[in-house]
Amino acid sequence: MFSYNLKLAMHSFKRAPSLYFLVLLTLSIGVGLLCANLALVSSMAGDPIPEKSDKLFHVSMNTWPDDQPQAEPLHILRYREAMKIVESDIPTHSAVFYASGVYARDSQSKSLQRFDSNVRATTPGFFALTKAPFAYGNGFAKSAGMEVVIGAVLNQKIFAGKNSVGEILELDGELLTIVGVLKPWSLRPLFYHVTEGRAFNLTDDIYAPLETAIDLGWSIHARSSSTVSNTGVQFTRDRDVFYLQAWVELASKAKQQAFQRYLDNYSQTLKNAGEHPLDIMNELRDVNTWLLEQKIVDQKVLAFTLASVLFLCVCVFNASSLLLSRFHSAKFEVGLRRALGASNKQMLMQGITESVVLGLIAGIISLLLSWLFLKLSISFLPDLANIAVLKPKLLLLGMVLALVTSVSSALYPLYRANRYTISAELK
Amino acid sequence: MNIKALFKSLLLRKFTTGLLILQLAITLGLLVNSAILAFDTKEKIAQSTGLDIDNILIMSTHPTSGNYRDLDYYRSIVTEDMVKLRQLSGIKSVSVTNQLPLRSRGMLRAIYDLDNPEQEKDDKYLQDVKYILTEEHLIDVMGLTLLEGRFLNSSDQFDFGSEEKHNIVITESLKRALYGDDSAIGQETNSGFIVGVIKDIILDPTLPSDKQYGLFINTIMEYIYFGRYYAMNVEPGQMESVRAKVSDIILNVQPERDIFKVFTMGEHLKRFYRDDQGLADLFMLLCGLMLFVTAISSYAYSQFHISRQKKFIGIRRALGARKKDVLLYVLTENWLVYGIGCLLGVVVAFGFNILLNQHIVLSKPDLILFLIATCIIFISGTLATWIPANSTSNISPVIATKTV
């Protein structure tokens, strides 16, 4: 029966190719566009580390030293608070870091060409906390030392992707040894640093020990706030300069509460010493809550997604009226088949088969189109370049959408067609 | 022409008519809002910035070598860069600065009058005043207008590490926030003594125009590692030739530098609104697609209608209706549908506008936009229905006799 229906569908396509072409075109443009937008939204709203996103917490504290209105806790911390967090043994892992940048070259290379590299100056806990994937070697064990870990991209640029552990890099005139090389690592969003519009940046090129970076005076490339004049990162350890971000991994609810108490107690000691004029407000936010709070999903993309939903509606309406006219012109045939004893159900099955086939073809075309629309969106909104990927789940969604729209646009025309009677036609 | 009869005829095919009206309404809603987006963006890019926008060239650069960690070396290179750049024909003046106007955030500092430290609590914008490290030539480069006192001069650059209070120049809106209509010259703020006030320029386009708080201080040489931008004022008409040369000039002074970009202030402004422009363009693209789809629908609608009404139209022709009358009849019927669609479209446009406003900022629709969008829909709809309408008028009266 199915193959018979299929044959009928093909027959019907052949009878009115231009009409079916238009139906296919409008449906696949509509689905393709929406799918491309959903791909962007899902990348932006995705969970970058699902296996433990509920155990990783961003630490915000409210330790501003004067009573200038800083109502919200800050996402950046002073060195002294950051060290308090690193000291604690409540978290399974903790990472305290700031973003910087240096120029890198292979110290053995004859070329003087240096590569602009993003630096994460961090405590060693970073690698375990973020599950950074190592290709060669491993992370550094201490917060100080002339050692670095480099990312796959930089390793490709400088060492053509080979195992560069043990090689020595010249970074802004200093020599540091590579102890680890990461595999290609993409985090969408870059959960560990989503502030300052960095949520969709690539992972860093160089991971350097925090104390070393501070000693070398590698400048702060993200937000820093201070109540005193900030003359360089090397002098920040005992000053009121806020620039470090902190993440902790807390294995259980109990640990979470214990760590909250730990932070609050610390703030209380500051208060007792008269260094904490504001209310105590320390916040732990797990990955997804933190991402949501930072509103990283691009509002422009959301706006355009709304528009493409409307567009898809128009496409479905259009397909529906096209199909109606198609069924109308096939009235005689339908009437004849009914007169020969085809039941309502059989007619419906035939119609559905036809629209399913149509939906499948539309689905395939729309996947191609959504890839095209993604490329197009990037050329209009270049900031999205790093997140414009079609994940398998989106491909599936595209297919389902195409099927649903195709079947739904055929529903009313089918209902109408099933009411045609042969007697009316024979007249 | 009998409107009542037309309505009746439309009601005969409620479903297709309803679908088409909905499509038209959505199309109009999208057209109107896309036009708003496009006009808003255009307006933003065309806004007056208070800068000599067409003649300013900027080069952003950063040293790549560790030698620059010796600040005296760094300063000597920058000084030589500026000398060499000034020698280039076509360049009127050169300056160096830590940050550019037309950008959000950046290096900010809280500013208040020393006698009135509570000020910043009443005006939160005072906590985030743009802190511009530069030197004396910036006034010529940017084309700033002095309102009071003087701009920075070379005597404002003190010995490095000196604890002495610096002289500063502030923007007009900052002066108003601090001192109202009084003169600001000689007043002492937490960042130094005010020696001049300049007319407002757009420092951060995301802030209101009367909150363009900025402060200029002659300390860029002391903190030379912040000196990321060379800004140059170029003779009119020389932009392209100067632009092609500047990178090589400073690389000849010292090659171990990364030059990120050489751009005009006009491009800088466009860059700020790049995403707005991109979104507006995407909406325009969608409008094109939507019009295309709606045109197909209009075509299919009248085609379908004709196939069903052949007989009646034939009877009409037999009863004496001329070709012209039939054409007009079909078109009027379609226009009626478009009219209803556009009326409903007004509601959709407002609804969509409100919906979009949850995500982006855009102005409210106005009457002219509705009229233009309605015209576009009528024209494209009429074009799409012309062929079927025309063929309808060719239906021969004989058809009336064919069937019972």
Image (tube, coloured by chain):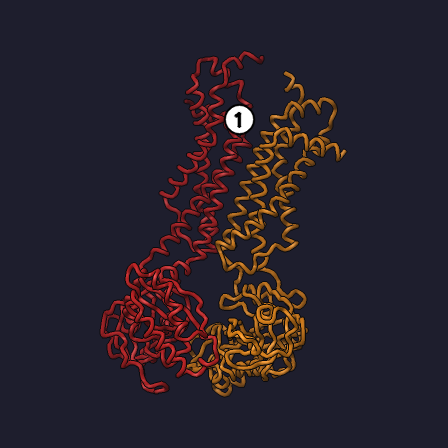
- Residue B273 in view of the camera: yes
The residue sitting at the front extreme is: A110
Residue A254: percent from left, percent from top: 67, 75
- Residue B171 in view of the camera: no
Residue at 40 percent across and 49 percent down: it is B36
Q: Secondary structure at mark 1?
A: helix
Q: Dot 1: within a 10 Å radius of its alpha carbon, few (fewer than 14), some, or many (20 or more) residues?
A: many
Q: Colour of chain B?
A: red
Q: Is residue B236 above or below residue A329?
A: below
State the residue in front, A296 or A36.
Answer: A36
Residue B294: percent from left, percent from top: 50, 37
Q: Is residue B368 above or below residue A335?
A: below
Q: Is residue B255 above or below residue A48?
A: below
- Classify residue A76 as left or right of residue A50: left
State the residue in front, B56 or B119.
Answer: B56
Q: Quadrant of residue A158?
A: bottom right
Residue B49: percent from left, percent from top: 32, 61
Residue at 32 percent across and 60 percent down: it is B54
The residue where tag 1 is placed is B305
- Classify residue A315 as left or right of residue B147: right
Amino acid type, residue under disc 1 in the picture: His
Q: Which chain is orange?
A: A
Q: Is residue B396 above or below residue A377?
A: above
Residue B13: percent from left, percent from top: 54, 28
